Amino acid sequence: MARISLAGRQELVRALGGRYQDGTLEGKGRILDEFVALTGYHRKHAIRLLSGATAASPPSPPRPHRPRLYDEAVRQALVVLWEASDRICAKRLKPLLAVLLPSLERHGHILLDVGVRTRLLAVSASTIDRMLAGTRASAGGRRARPKPTPGIRRSIAIRTFADWHEPAPGFLEVDLVAHGGDTAAGSFVHTLVLTDIATGWTECVALLVRESSVIVEALERMRLCLPFPLSGIDTDNGSEFINETLLAFCQRYNVDFTRSRPYRKNDQAWVEQKNGSVVRRLVGYGRLEGVAAAEALSRLYSASRLFVNSFSRRSSSRRRRASAPASASGTTHPRRPVPVC
């Protein structure tokens, strides 16, 4: 037998509820059997419905929606403050609002209504995350990547952030920065970033596509441009790095090849910092695609590499510390002249 609709079941509860409550034990049993057969309800649930039919019969009114407290004006002001704070996370942005907002108002960068200003200062960190979710997504998204071969992955040792132990110059963390804009569809330009652990020296290479052979070609060029011998590379677990092509390159030049733990970005803290302070600060988050964009990006990196490496206070201090003592093995590494690539 086909079961009746929800409206029909509600009508049946109202019709049988009074008879069920006033009936005898035998009569209640017959009513309950017929009601369960018609509605398909569980017997205990049917007893509860028929016993409280008078209270459950009127449909409950729809719950009124609470008016939205933080409107579009608050969201737009929040986006301005987020950009002015260099896109920090919500937990850091929340206490900064009380300092950053008056500063921007004092210099004429933002002018808010009194109500908008009050609501903006009262917003919580979790609400900031929800309101900025769309803006963060448009700033740059992720796309799924194919998984590398398990056998190759197992053959590459894992190195964590605590395993470096003051290495000599030449051990680099390597990562890719995608310039896909607000969508990961199609083909777009990537930046290969190489950061030396001991000195902070950073090289950036524009890649037309994300492909292992292109990465190896870039490493071949950078091997000759670095001011120290290339001794080791540490990558993430993406298929563009964990493959036979890059493994063969490392074996050919006796380069130590390690990888970070999956989903542990802190294992590559040095290069992740340079992704933001060098690449994103120079290039931004827009979409770059095509040969012309890759060539323009290459010219930008060629013009800025000596500024980034020679005039950065942090990298200069790290180079002084690294070049003064001998390495852990007792051998010294003389400074090489910086080639112009």
Image (cartoon, rainbow, N blue to C red):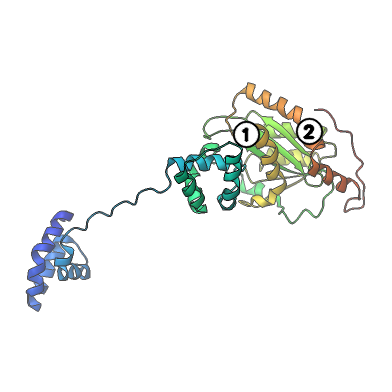
Q: Callout 2 environment at 10 Å: few (<14), some (14 to 19), or many (20+)? A: few
Q: Which mark is residue 79?
A: none
Position in image of residue 261 (x %, y %): 65, 52
Q: Is residue 136 visible?
A: no
Q: Which mark is residue 307?
A: 2
Q: From the viewer's side, name the closer residue of 297 and 77.
A: 77
For marks 1 and 2 on the same chain, the one whose residue lies earlier in the sequence: 1
Amino acid at circle 1: Gly
Location of residue 302 (image quadrant): top right
Residue at (38% x, 48% y) in the render: 68
Q: From the viewer's side, name the closer residue of 21 and 4.
A: 21
Q: From the viewer's side, name the closer residue of 75 and 180.
A: 75
Q: Which residue is mark 1?
A: 284
Residue at (53% x, 30% y) in the render: 186
Q: What whole-number distance in Å separates the C-alpha atoms at marks 1 and 2?
A: 18 Å
- The local secondary structure at tag 1 comes to loop
214 left or right, relative to 322: left
Looking at the image, is 148 positioned above or below residue 50? above
Looking at the image, is 186 positioned above or below residue 38? above
Position in image of residue 10 (x %, y %): 15, 59
Position in image of residue 123 (x %, y %): 49, 51
258 left or right, relative to 338: left
Amino acid at circle 2: Phe
Residue at (48% x, 51% y) in the render: 127
- The local secondary structure at tag 2 comes to helix
Position in image of residue 274 (x %, y %): 70, 41
Location of residue 238 (image quadrant): top right
Q: Residue furthest top?
A: 292
Residue at (70% x, 49% y) in the render: 269
Q: From the viewer's side, name the closer residue of 82 and 263.
A: 82
136 left or right, relative to 157: left
